[in-house]
Amino acid sequence: MLRAAQGGASLDHAVPADTASAAWKDEVFAALEGAGVTQVYYVPDAGHATLIARAHAHPRMRAVPLTSEEEGVAGCVGAWLGGAKAVLLMQSSGVGNCVNMLSLPRTCGAPFLTLVTMRGEWAEFNPWQVPMSRATATVLEAMGVAVRRVDRAEDAAETVDAAAALAYGASQAVAVLLAQRLVGRKVWK
Amino acid sequence: MLDRRDAVRALLAGRPAGLLVVAGLGTPAYDLFAAGDYDANFYLWGAMGGAAMVGLGLALAQPDRPVLVLTGDGEALMGLGALATIGAQKPANLLVVVLDNGHFGETGMQPSHTSLGTDLPRVAEACGFAWSATVRDMAGVEAIRPRLAAPAGPGLVRAVIGAEPTPKALPPRDGAYLATRFRAQLGLAPD
């Protein structure tokens, strides 16, 4: 059982297996840790389960489960106002929930970093995931968020590291889309 | 029933040193500005539904500072899920004050859900807030005021205010300016 190191929410079940466990997920977490991220906002996705578990277990991170993704956009800006670095973890369907709230980092010149696991694009079983999946990059770009996409495991950590440098170093809004092929098929059994 | 300007002025009279304030868009931001402009005030002019979560991110980043979110019933209702998120995190330094006139005041005074059955203090308590209260008069505001320096939160106060129009008192709208000066008073250099 994993418990949070510092108050707030904690995971009260054994961490379930990701749709696919892989070393690159640990490397992505290390990139976030190395960038100085201390607040991790998330709406869960199986593809983010490793990051979420690591964040809950980390002594200097606060992992914050959300009821809806736009809460995390506002939380990230609040963190920056207070001098902390934050990240939002969500899946592609959640990007649609964030649209107007993305005016907040844009108007304030705040850094914003989000890691988005893609659904609806690779061996997708559920048609309801497809429309927002196809609109994800367009919606983010329309709101001024730079989009980087990772299709290969060997590119994941470097892309997240570069996105974090762009976000926190140059005060930009940046999304890293993690391809469904990379994250792994959802198993419907 | 409270006059909103008088209530906010009284709440912030003798403002505690180190208090950080986030104001939701619309009249609550004007009320805060009218009570005195400070670098430690962050006024939202949009991002409706986001005020409480900006407050949470700030409260987690600055755990030794009291953080006040001053917002309206419409803004709080749009971000109702944030109360569940805050209740889960239990930031002791966060206080949310909702100026509740029961209406969407900026857009034609349509009745809001707080006029139609939603009781925000009960929602907050059900979400795990440490405490909540409803204040209807200046004595109630005076009783809440010490909580600004020591929220013992998360707390939520519903201040029942009138729905009559108030004079506009418009804070700066430049988000980058507001953010830069806010961060500067915390000793954070511009990027």
Image (tube, grey):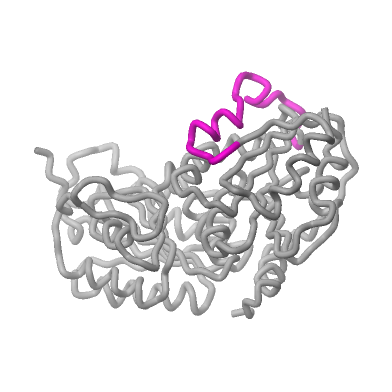
- Could you tell me if residue A137 is visible in this image? no
Q: Is residue A30 magenta?
A: no
Q: Is residue B130 magenta?
A: yes
- The picture places residue B187, in percent across and down from the top left corner, at 65, 77
Above-or-below relation of B94 to B58: above
Above-or-below relation of A129 to A59: above
Above-or-below relation of A92 to A28: above
Which residue, as the protein is rendered here, is positioned at the far left? A189
- Which quadrant is the C terminus of chain A positioned in? top left
- Could you tell me if residue B34 is visible in this image? yes
State which quadrant residue A47 falls in.
bottom left
Which residue, as the protein is rendered here, is positioned at the far top? B116
Q: Relative to residue A65, is residue B65 drawn left or right? A: right
- The picture places residue B183, in percent across and down from the top left corner, at 65, 71
Total number of numbered discs in the rendering: 0
The residue under the point 60% across, 48% down is: B152
The residue under the point 36% across, 48% down is: A43
The residue under the point 16% across, 69% down is: A23
State which quadrant residue A7 falls in.
bottom left
Q: Nearer the viewer, residue A23 or B121?
A: B121
- The picture places residue A90, in percent across and down from the top left corner, at 36, 53
The residue under the point 58% across, 47% down is: B153
Residue range in magenta is B106-131
Q: Nearer the viewer, residue A19 or B135?
A: B135
- The picture places residue A162, in percent across and down from the top left corner, at 37, 77
